[in-house]
Amino acid sequence: MKTLTRLSLDRPKAVVLGWLVILAVAMPFALQLTGALKAGGFSDPRGASVDAQETLEAAFDEAPNSLLIVLNGDDPAAVDAAVDTAGQAADREGVSAVVDRDDQPGWVSEDGRTTFLQVAFTSDNTTVQNLVPDVRDDVGEAVGPDVEVNVTGAPALDYALNMHSKDDVTRAELIAFPVLFVVLLLVFRSVAAMAVPLALAGVTLMITQAIGFAMTKVTDVNSLFTNIVTMVGLAVAVDYSLFIVKRFREELAEGLDVRRALERTMATVGHSVLFSGLAVVVALSALFVPRAMSFTSIALGGVAVSVIAVLMAITLLPAVLSLLGHRINWGSLRRRSRSGAAGSPTGDTGSAASADGNADAPRVTRFPGRPGVVLAGLAVGFTVLALPATQLTLRVPVASADILPASDEARVGMERIQEDIGIREMFPIQVVLTADEANAAELLETAGAVADRAAGLPGADEVRSVSDLPLGAAELTQALDGTLTLDDEAAAAVAQLVSTEDGSLVTRVMVIAAGDPDSSVAHDLVGELRSEVDDLTGTGVEAKIAGATATGSDFDSLVLRSAPVVVGFVALLSFLILLAAFRSVLLPLLALALNVAVVAASLGVLALVSGNGEQSINSVTPLMLFAVMFGLSMDYMVIMFSRMREMYLDGVPHRQAVLGGLARTAGLVNGAAAIMVAVFASFTSAQISIVRELGISLAVAVLLDAVVVRRLLMPAALLLIGERIWGRRPAGTAPTDPPAPIEAADGPDSLPPGAEVSSEADSPRSAAPALR
């Protein structure tokens, strides 16, 4: 830190120029990020369903990337006439097949007003995504105004997800920046001090997006990358700048010259920023554990933006402040003190007690005399808030468009198929059976046993298998090699249910669930089939479950398996970091318990406002919430615990140290929390459901953490535990004589010696001793 500070102060112009060069290089690449992102990643790449799906695609020559063109109109004859026109307009380079109601009679609604075509592509998903606008325009123009055209299917849904993710980030930034403008202006009461954090936040986001574009060249990156970069980036970049700029102005107000003020600022708050950044990086790194593209993309974005934010805060920001000097107070909005005197240039009033939020110090210091009662009451309250979370179902939607806004064309098309025709047959659960050709008879026997067992399971509506065909093993082999002639219907049935791959026979038992693919009925049916199939599989026959529901079930299982590892990883490293910082075992344990309470309560609130019939949320949300909240809450903990511990080590009695430290840090915590709430609340308007869920839960979590936990629950716990929370008191720091009861104080001036509120009340000055 000393080396970086010295560099920034000795050569501030060079440091600023270096970052400007980096920004200039980054901007062209940052602008290309959206087109390079992908929307997949909600599957377990090592799951059995993925392996089974690959077997199906190879054996039955199925194109994984298909667009569905939905046609709907008031005149059934017009819809029927539009089918051929739509097929011709959609056919282009890369299309392997166009399937319509002539090939699949069930793809027409009963009233004939709705039908759809499947356009299969040989290209990869990203290529097909980029074709969606052209296909939509070409088919719409060819069909004419009498028939409504909606393009849906996996690539179209992915394309829409990417576009809406971009719109969500833009909308959130348009909401967040003006709100941050107001919050920072109220905190600093200076135009220059307000502008510096916002400028650094913008640069942080731009450089991180360029890094994201570079990442897309070596790995697949999900579109959630941009959302997490903006969420975490704005929160940490502005908060870190807030801490440093605020402390720098206080040092200037005490009469220090610019260089000395910056040296003291970086020696204290700079260490807090490093510590907080490390905590965020550690917490978000835990999301690498599941090794799924969605989680990995979130981890990459969060870690990258946190590292950039910290680097800028400890290099660029000191250089900028060195060049600005006292001009950081430019545009000061003076305010009147209680005595009526004009405030200082820093925006602080003549009364130190009212500076930066400490006007409410009397309320803070009049803490209830029975912390056990307060703690018990709040514990009950948090338990009540968390209870709805126990009713939540974690489920990633893989066969529906619910994640998209209701007006999106791809969602409208998918829901039209679901309502008018039905999508259950489009997303069957498939038991994939593979055996050598020598075991053809055993394969057929196994397929029949599986089909019979599946038909008797609750939730199974229809079952199709090769056992329905009047063919023996020898006839089936002859039909596959072309030596047995079959009629068209029988040949189509064989082609759909049996094939060969690398010298092996592959057959599938297709089970149509009674509910939609993302319903509990379908998921329960997948679980039943998995528990039954292995017992029915004969020697030499391999069985795997495929289908959209199975893929979603595997991803949900991956999340549940990963959750204990992620929680343990974050908890252990957070414990070790706090243990090293504060030399106390009880303090880290208390911090972990408080964070768990906040996460559980915010999930409970999310369950209350989710408003869907099955009380389900995306299975990605809880782990994201846990990792992000654990990392960001370290900002408050470091500042508050450090200030309390410093007072305790200075000889102040435990109760006085807790309440005095709380009064000193209240303003800074309020300002930092307001910034985070503003950022996260801006994402509650997101059109993508998972982003909206995260915005709601994080905004609630920060409010609970800053308003309830840090001001009531934490001090109550600290007072109840007693001074053993700080570990062994060093020699020579015996407590002073007991002062008058703090709860009877009438104001900051009545605080006992050692607990007075000074003009530097809210600064995290105490972080340095804890981290040295």
Image (cartoon, rainbow, N blue to C red):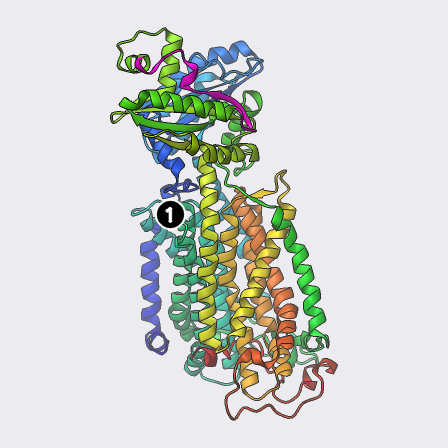
Which amino acid lies under the numbered mark 1 shown in the image of this protein? Answer: Leu
Crowding around mark 1 (Cα neighbors within 10 Å: few <14, some 14 to 19, many 20+) is: few
Please state which of residues 51 and 31 is positioned toward the viewer in this rendering: 51
> In this rendering, is residue 457 above or below 243?
above
Please state which of residues 62 and 160 is positioned toward the viewer in this rendering: 62
Please state which of residues 54 and 229 is positioned toward the viewer in this rendering: 54
Q: Is residue 722 magenta?
A: no
> In this rendering, is residue 202 above or below 108?
below
Q: Is residue 488 visible?
A: yes
Q: Is residue 473 magenta?
A: yes
Q: Quadrant of residue 506?
A: top left
Q: Quadrant of residue 367?
A: bottom right
Please state which of residues 750 and 446 is positioned toward the viewer in this rendering: 446
Quarter occupied by the C terminus = bottom left
Give the x, y percent position of residue 720.
Answer: 65, 75
Quarter occupied by the N terminus = bottom left
Give the x, y percent position of residue 461.
Answer: 54, 23
In the image, taking residue 138 as reference, residue 192 lies left or right, namely right
Marks counted in the figure total 1
Give the x, y percent position of residue 16.
Answer: 35, 67
Q: Is label 1 in a helix, a strand or a loop?
A: loop
Residue at the spot 42% in from the left edge and 17% down from the top edge: 467
The span shown in magenta is 456-474
Residue at the spot 51% in from the left edge and 74% down from the top edge: 585
Residue at the spot 51% in from the left edge and 27% down from the top edge: 413
Residue wearing tag 1:
31
Q: Is residue 355 visible?
A: no
Give the x, y percent position of residue 278.
Answer: 42, 66
